[in-house]
């Protein structure tokens, strides 16, 4: 009998413990994360009364894969466009909270005399509230629809993103063991460079690739392709010096902008749940009861630090972002716990060997305690606000309320200069990053490949030409993009003093492009600066005036924007998201609402002309969504059918009248009283010579037309039963099998009985 691998035995133990504990915690209505941690403690060597995991290293490898899938799934739920729409309130609050809690965590660690890296990592752990725990707590308490809950969830999204940045920075600090400002700036610049590069290239390539292969894509292949892309980005991130979790998150955020994002999220969910469970179980395996007892006072102090720190600094951060005091306190009291990212940051410190062994079990213990206190802290916010408002000076309360009002009433109207400069700066950063990446690839990979095939002279010429051609669309965009925009033309015509700065900006962009070309030429040939500048100027002028290059540059940007917005357009097409124009209707007291036609509506099968909704209710049907099809601006002859979704434009009063009419106009409303009469039944009668059916065909008998019944069988005199046709004759002595509603059958048989008598 063959022996099982220790890994399989360990997995059996881990998953069995996880299954049992999660069932218990589900029954107790507690977060499953805590169940996984308890399962890890049960399966760990620290628990002497139960079987223990044999090979901890293998489990840690699986746990690392779990982190990758957790961050990949987080990226799939994230959207850079949604982040831009969250607004300044969430960004200001999140940044303030993270900075405050990091400083507080560092101070607490220093007060215990811990090492410098332990203090810094502790600050990072305390800064990250748990999205899973807060979401569940708000949902269980029925508070998710309240205003403060939306603000809290928005801040948690920002915190998740900043947690990725924090992990990268902590990794850099761990490797360098240096806190020099210049090195930190270089790390941030490197992070931004690769983040922008991967996102831009990914959005340009991946949606187009998935669209091309969609005809051959099944659920199985989509899952394999998505996971393959995830691990490819993980490998690229590791090669660039970042963590695997960062690469997984980046790929998830890229795939989040594709049409297949929802399908990928559903397919990856079971895999994420499996490996995520192993990760959290591995967290529980790190819990050492002896160490928790030894560090009981630091645990108590850190718990109090989180409860008081998040309550005070969280409230202050939301007040700073422009929220009223009551809402700010509700938000601050909701963030008083740590969770998933604290575990990930703790495991990062251990894997890099820069944190002490005691920090991990302390963080786990603190997370467990603060998870249980979260609902109580949320409930405590209301009485706490009452106490604060009663004891805070009236002058302070008035200042806070007026500050909140001013924050919400101030209209931020961007000037043309601000719009123009923001657009130019954003465009230049993106195209410069792409240009640098293309130059690096051509010099480091393409040219050596050409030199291996061609003589040195021709290899360098070919490499130079390919590099210049490859970067030319991006250099043209750097020089000419936004030079004919609405803001540029408005600034040019509004004031003649604007023209000199505008011309200076154009010249600077041209000089930047010339600098790129000079660098590329100098990488292949040595020449004087004047000669390089002259050649570069000629090439740049050719780029500016080339119509073919202009079309190619526009095509690249248009493809990118189409891929970036493809998911939004697809969701609008399916009706999952309101079209963009719906937001502009609000300023004119008009709204776009969705109405699904009930299956039993009397409107089913009628045309829009017959319904005359515009005349009766003053509304307009903008679109009809039917299954996977969409009919925009339907004509009067278009019929509507059950389960059609109508997108209707109207005022509040008009839409309310339409809603009332749709609810009242139901077919078969009186059917509840006579449902017994509508029951279908089967009966038989014998054809005799006295009734008018004898000798007639089924069509001639009128049984279907006059009585509403259906002949389903004719039993011959020899006992055989056959299915009839409309031309089958009803002969004397045959037994006729009839199906119909009870009341129609009664009329038919009453008439037959009368004829028989």
Image (cartoon, rainbow, N blue to C red):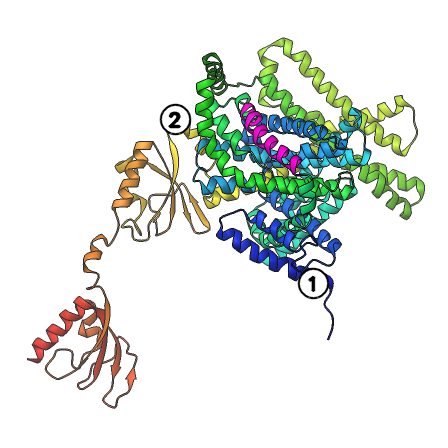
Dominant secondary structure (helix, strand or loop) of the stretch shown in magenta: helix
Determine whether the residue tagged by mark 1 lies in a helix, strand or loop.
helix
Quarter of the figure with residue 685: bottom left
Residue furthest out toward the bottom? 718
Q: Is residue 510 above or below residue 214?
A: above
Tag 2 residue = 588
The relative height of residue 274 versus residue 245 in the rendered view (above or below) is below
Badge 2: residue crowd in 10 Å (few <14, some 14–19, many ≥20): few
- Please state the horizontal and vertical placement of residue 334, each as a whole percent of the image: 52, 33
Q: Residue at x 25, y 52 (%)?
A: 667
The x and y percentages for residue 474 are 72, 32
State the quadrant of the C terminus: bottom left
Tell which tag, 2 or 1, sits nearer the viewer. Answer: 1
Taking the view exactly as shown, the residue that stands out farthest to the left is 757
Q: Left of 143 or right of it: where is 118?
A: right
The residue that appears at 90% across and 41% down in the rendered structure is 458
Q: Residue 304 lies in magenta, yes or no? A: yes
- Give the magenta-colored segment's residue range: 296-317
Contact flag, marks 2 and 1 (Cβ < 8 Å): no
Name the residue carrying label 1. Answer: 8
Residue nearer the viewer, 147 or 225:
147
The x, y position of residue 519, in whole percent, is 84, 29
Closer to us: 253 or 729: 253
N-term mark: 2 or 1: 1
Residue 218 appears in the rendering = no
Residue 106's spot in the image, x, y percent? 70, 29
Q: In the displayed structure, does residue 138 sit left or right of residue 590? A: right
């Amino acid at each position: 009998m063959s022996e099982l691998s220790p890994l399989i035995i360990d997995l059996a133990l881990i998953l069995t413990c996880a299954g049992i504990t999660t069932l218990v915690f589900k029954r107790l209505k507690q977060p499953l994360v805590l169940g996984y941690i308890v399962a890890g403690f049960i399966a760990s060597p620290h628990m002497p009364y139960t079987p223990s995991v044999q090979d901890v290293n293998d489990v840690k490898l699986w746990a690392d894969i779990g982190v990758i899938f957790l961050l990949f799934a987080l990226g799939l739920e994230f959207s850079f466009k949604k982040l831009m729409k969250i607004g300044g309130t969430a960004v200001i609050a999140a940044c303030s909270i993270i900075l405050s809690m990091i400083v507080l965590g560092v101070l607490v660690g220093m007060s215990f005399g811990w090492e410098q890296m332990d203090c810094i990592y502790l600050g990072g752990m305390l800064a990250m509230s748990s999205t899973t725990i807060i979401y569940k707590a708000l949902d269980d308490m029925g508070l998710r629809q309240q205003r403060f809950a939306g603000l809290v969830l928005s801040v948690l999204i920002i915190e998740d993103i900043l947690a990725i940045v924090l992990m990268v920075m902590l990794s850099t600090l761990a490797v360098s063991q240096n806190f020099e400002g210049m090195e930190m700036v270089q790390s941030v610049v490197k992070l931004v460079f690769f983040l922008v590069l991967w996102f831009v290239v990914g959005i340009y390539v991946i949606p187009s690739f998935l669209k091309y292969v969609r005809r051959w894509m099944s659920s199985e292949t989509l899952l394999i392709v998505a996971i393959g892309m995830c691990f490819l980005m993980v490998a690229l991130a590791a090669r660039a010096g970042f963590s695997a979790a960062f690469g997984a998150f980046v790929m998830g955020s890229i795939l989040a902008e594709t049409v297949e994002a929802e399908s990928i999220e559903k397919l990856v969910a079971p895999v994420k749940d499996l490996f995520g469970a192993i990760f959290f179980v591995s967290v529980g395996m790190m819990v050492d009861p002896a160490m928790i007892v030894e560090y009981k006072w630091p645990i108590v102090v850190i718990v109090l630090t989180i409860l008081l720190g998040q309550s005070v600094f969280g409230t202050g951060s939301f007040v700073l972002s422009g929220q009223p005091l009551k809402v700010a306190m509700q938000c601050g009291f909701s963030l008083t716990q740590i969770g998933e990212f604290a575990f990930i940051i703790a495991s990062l410190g251990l894997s890099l060997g820069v944190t002490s062994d005691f920090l991990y079990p302390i963080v786990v213990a603190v997370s467990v305690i603060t998870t249980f206190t979260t609902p109580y802290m949320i409930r405590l916010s209301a009485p706490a606000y009452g106490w604060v408002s009663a004891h805070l000076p009236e002058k302070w309360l008035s200042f806070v309320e007026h500050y909140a009002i001013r924050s919400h009433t101030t209209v931020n109207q961007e000037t043309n200069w601000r719009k123009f400069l923001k657009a130019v700066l954003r465009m230049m950063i993106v195209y410069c990053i792409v240009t640098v990446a293309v130059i690096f690839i051509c010099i480091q990979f393409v040219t050596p490949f050409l030199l291996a095939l061609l003589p040195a002279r021709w290899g360098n010429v070919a490499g130079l030409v390919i590099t210049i051609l490859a970067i030319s669309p991006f250099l043209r965009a750097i020089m000419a993009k936004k030079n004919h925009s609405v803001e540029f033309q408005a600034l040019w015509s509004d004031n003649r003093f604007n023209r000199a700065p505008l011309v200076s900006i154009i010249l600077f962009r041209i000089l930047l492009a010339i600098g790129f070309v000079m660098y590329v030429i100098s990488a292949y040939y040595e020449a004087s600066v004047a000669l390089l500048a002259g050649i570069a100027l000629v090439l740049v002028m050719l780029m500016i005036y080339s119509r073919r290059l202009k079309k190619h540059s526009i095509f690249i940007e248009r493809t990118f924007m189409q891929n970036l917005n493809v998911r939004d357009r697809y969701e609008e097409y399916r009706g999952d998201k309101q079209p963009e124009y719906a937001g502009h209707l609000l300023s004119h007291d008009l709204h776009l609402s969705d109405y699904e036609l009930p299956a039993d509506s009397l409107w089913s099968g009628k045309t829009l002309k017959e319904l005359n909704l515009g005349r009766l209710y003053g509304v307009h049907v903008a679109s009809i969504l039917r299954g996977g099809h969409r009919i925009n601006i339907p004509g009067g002859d278009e019929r509507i059918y059950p389960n059609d979704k109508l997108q209707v434009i109207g005022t509040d009063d008009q839409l309310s009248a339409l809603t009332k009419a749709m609810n009242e106009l139901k077919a078969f409303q009186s059917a509840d009283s006579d449902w017994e009469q509508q029951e279908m039944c089967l009966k038989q009668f014998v054809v005799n010579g006295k009734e008018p059916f004898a000798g007639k065909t089924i069509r001639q008998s009128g049984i279907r037309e006059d009585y509403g019944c259906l002949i389903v069988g004719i039993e011959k005199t020899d006992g055989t039963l056959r299915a009839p046709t409309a031309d089958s004759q009803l002969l004397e002595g045959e037994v006729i099998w009839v199906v119909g509603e009870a009341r129609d059958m009664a009329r038919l048989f009453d008439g037959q009985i009368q004829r028989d008598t």
